[in-house]
Image: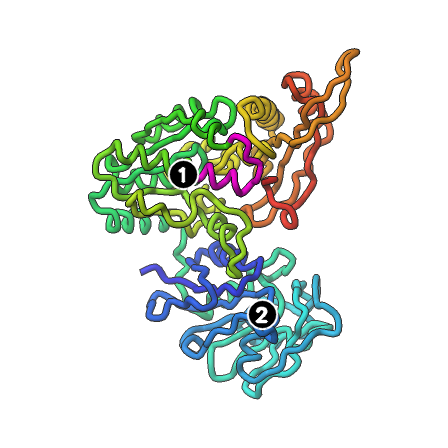
Amino acid sequence: MQEKIIILDFGSQTTQLIGRRVRELNTYCEIVPYNKFPYGDESVKGVILSGSPFSVNDADAFKPDLSQIRGKYPVLGICYGAQYIAYSSGGKVEKSDSREYGRAHLAKVNAGEPLFDGIAIGSQVWMSHGDTITNLPNSFEIIASTADVAIGGYKVEGEPTWAVQFHPEVYHTTDGTRLLSNFLNICKVKRDWSPASFIDTTVAELKEEIGDDKVILALSGGVDSSVTAVLLNRAIGKNLTCVFVDHGLLRKNEFQNVLSDYEHLGLNVIGVNAKERFYTQLAGVSDPEGKRKIIGKGFIDVFDEEAHKLKDIKWLGQGTIYPDIIESLSITGHVIKSHHNVGGLPEKMHLKLVEPLRLLFKDEVRRVGLELGMKESLIKRHPFPGPGLGIRVLGDITAEKVEILQNADDIYTRMLKEHDLYDKVWQAGAILLPIRSVGVMGDERTYESTIALRAVTSVDGMTADWAHLPYEFLAKVSNEIINKVKGVNRVVYDISSKPPATIEWE
């Protein structure tokens, strides 16, 4: 039985970082909504309460009953989690005189306190809250403070409950990983989570879940679907059929290149040319969500047709990963953007869904792929959106626009590799803007399209910074695109970070 830590999500933007940090400490964890604790699961060894965009004093704040959790499991409250534990026990949480946000330093740490073992006074922490705890219940003891926050951390006497008002999961908290490691020590959880253990556990679970049933899988050529395919192939072998759809929105020559890449994997792959079908359905559609939904439905329709050509298909495999789930529906119910590979399938398909990577972050997927023996060239490919170039051609889509973007993107990607920059960025791509601008080529005035280049650095795609590519390199790429791609006379570079921007433009 895989021991685990449960992270109760109260809607914080950094909840996923808590999960990443715990995983990095070789400990399996699951993030669940604040009100969906898995009671009765004997594999749970500890509980972490995340931050939240709400104040505990808000009428619509998330306020679960913790009576069956506190005292039974070691508990760590973070920011809102810390405030809610105090508030729900009779303490007082009030608006701060000034918003407590940014770097601070520990001014007091109780000697011998296990949560702060190895963390010295002066250690930097990161605050991000508008409220602060002003009064603790009698059974609560302050164990850490900063110059401005008297109750920086506390523990509850008589039960294994600790809390901090800062964020140990973020990079700016210098000893945050140490604090989380100390909490895992308190939980006495086995630290046996690794790519190898994930593979062994997942293959065994897939064999048990799927049995002798047959599975159809959507291959995209990307890391997620490829690793999913290899995992399923290891579990069920010939009962897996992979379908790779050319929706006309792939990179230049990608359909042929991807089929070639899969030769060493021993997969049963069917290639489907559906370009004209997708172009027809997308004609005149400019809304990003509209395009995503059309492309998503198109994929499902194609798979449905291919599944009916095969006998006894019972499952649809998908390469859904954690960020897909997170961005498709947040804890507050607000959709950031829809993903074609997330959510229930149309009832007409009569297929069950299998998503073996749904709890992994992108870097974890890559480590699993390497552990499976897959080629580095396939594993290290940049993330590519499911809707493909359909969301990188801003506005309506035509075959002519796609060809312009394919040619520009091909130059950009090739030059990143030639200048040893490809592996130094998380994701890069070209975007065709829905504007035309005046230019001069030779003695003639032009009125042509603009290409935006995007490159970001990231660990898991949840946050990202724009890549500081050399000016000389950008100048060479711009010159090459303008000279070689007919229809483009201007190239710009996107220097936006996520947040507030997203990695993709649509």
Q: Residue at the location (48% across, 72% down)?
A: 75
The residue at the point 29 percent across, 35 percent down is 307
Q: Residue 325, relative to residue 174: is it above or below?
A: above
Location of residue 111 by image quarter: bottom right
Secondary structure of the residue carrying tag 1 is helix
Dominant SS in magenta: helix
Reply above or below: 68 against 336.
below
Judge left or right: residue 157 versus residue 5. Answer: right
Residue bearing mark 2: 80
Mark linked to residue 479: none
Choose the circle earlier in sequence order: 1 or 2. Answer: 2
Q: Nearer the viewer, residue 471 or 9?
A: 9
Residue 309: x and y in percent read: 26, 31
| Horizontal arrangement in the rendering, residue 73 relative to residue 413 (left or right) | left
Quarter in which the N terminus is drawn: bottom left
Three-letter residue code for mark 1: Ser
Q: Is residue 414 visible?
A: no
- Residue 313 within the segment the image draws in magenta: no
* Residue at the top extreme of this rendering: 443
- Report x, y in % for residue 196: 37, 47
Residue range in magenta is 283-296
- Secondary structure of the residue carrying tag 2 is helix
| Residue 8, position as x, y percentages in the image | 48, 65
Q: Amino acid at mark 2?
A: Tyr
Residue sitting at x 37%, y 36%: 301
Q: Is residue 12 visible?
A: yes
In the foreground, 113 or 296: 296
Farthest residue to the right: give it: 443
Task: Find disc 1 in the rendering and name its residue.
Answer: 225
Q: Quadrant of residue 84?
A: bottom right
Answer with left or right where residue 26 lies relative to residue 140.
left
